Amino acid sequence: MLKKIFGRKGTDKEDKMMQEILKENYVLGVKSPQEDTQKQSVKPERIAEIDVLINGIKERSYPLFPGRLLVGRDPAQVDLVISELIVSKSHCTFLVSPSEVLLRDNSSTNGTYVQGDAVEELRITEDVLVSLGRKGVVQLHVRFLKNQESESAPSDTLFG
């Protein structure tokens, strides 16, 4: 599935997530008997936001929608570019579902940390501060949106 979309083979978890996202975000239907069947895109719902902090100063915010978000230094490889030398070309990946976010380190040189602990993969279900590199010069504050908290979360998650 991911090979068709992104040009690389995905893991089973990524493939399952992408199938679910495609199923949720695109509807095939008939508008009226006179019109041809056509694909209508449904605007995906924003799940969370990432605040990019450099030396503790908020530089910008980036919305998280269901799907995959690659973070790193190389604009040719990633979606969210952070031009700091401590950040690897392709540093980490956020896989976003409607109920949670999966953070995965992409074998970065300086590592990905949450609360001082190095993480290879971490399921995120609440607000968290992610450091790119041990020193914490570059941080990503993942903030879930309030309207998501009030809705009941599905019992089955995509990363279970």
Image: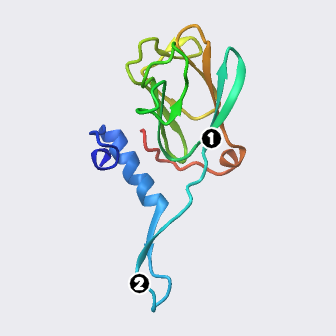
Q: Is residue 71 left or right of residue 135?
A: left
Residue 38: quadrant of the picture: bottom left
Question: In the rendering, at what x and y percent does residue 111 appear?
Answer: 46, 14
Question: In the rendering, at what x and y percent does residue 54 appear?
Answer: 65, 18
Q: Amino acid at mark 2?
A: Asp
Q: Residue at x 28, y 39 (%)?
A: 8
**In the image, residue 99 above or below residue 87:** below
Mark 2 Cα shell of 10 Å, populated few (<14), some (14-19), many (≥20): few
Comparing labels 1 and 2, the label whose residue is closer to the camera: 2
Q: Residue at x 69, y 27 (%)?
A: 59
Looking at this view, is 88 or 93 the one in front?
88
Q: Amino acid at mark 1?
A: Ala
Q: Secondary structure at mark 2?
A: loop
In this view, which residue lies farthest toward the top? 135
**In the image, residue 56 above or below residue 38:** above
Query: Marks 1 and 2, how far apart in space?
Result: 36 Å
Q: Is residue 143 left or right of residue 111?
A: right
**In the image, residue 21 above or below residue 92:** below
**In the image, residue 109 above or below residue 126:** above
Looking at this view, is 119 or 81 the one in front?
81
Q: Is residue 64 left or right of residue 24?
A: right
Pick whichever of labels 1 and 2 is earlier in the sequence: 2
Q: Residue at x 55, y 17 (%)?
A: 84
Question: In the rendering, at what x and y percent does residue 140 appear?
Answer: 61, 25
- Residue that carries the numbered disc 2 in the rendered image: 36
> The C terminus is located in which quarter?
top left
- Residue that carries the numbered disc 1 in the rendered image: 48
Looking at this view, is 38 or 125 the one in front?
38
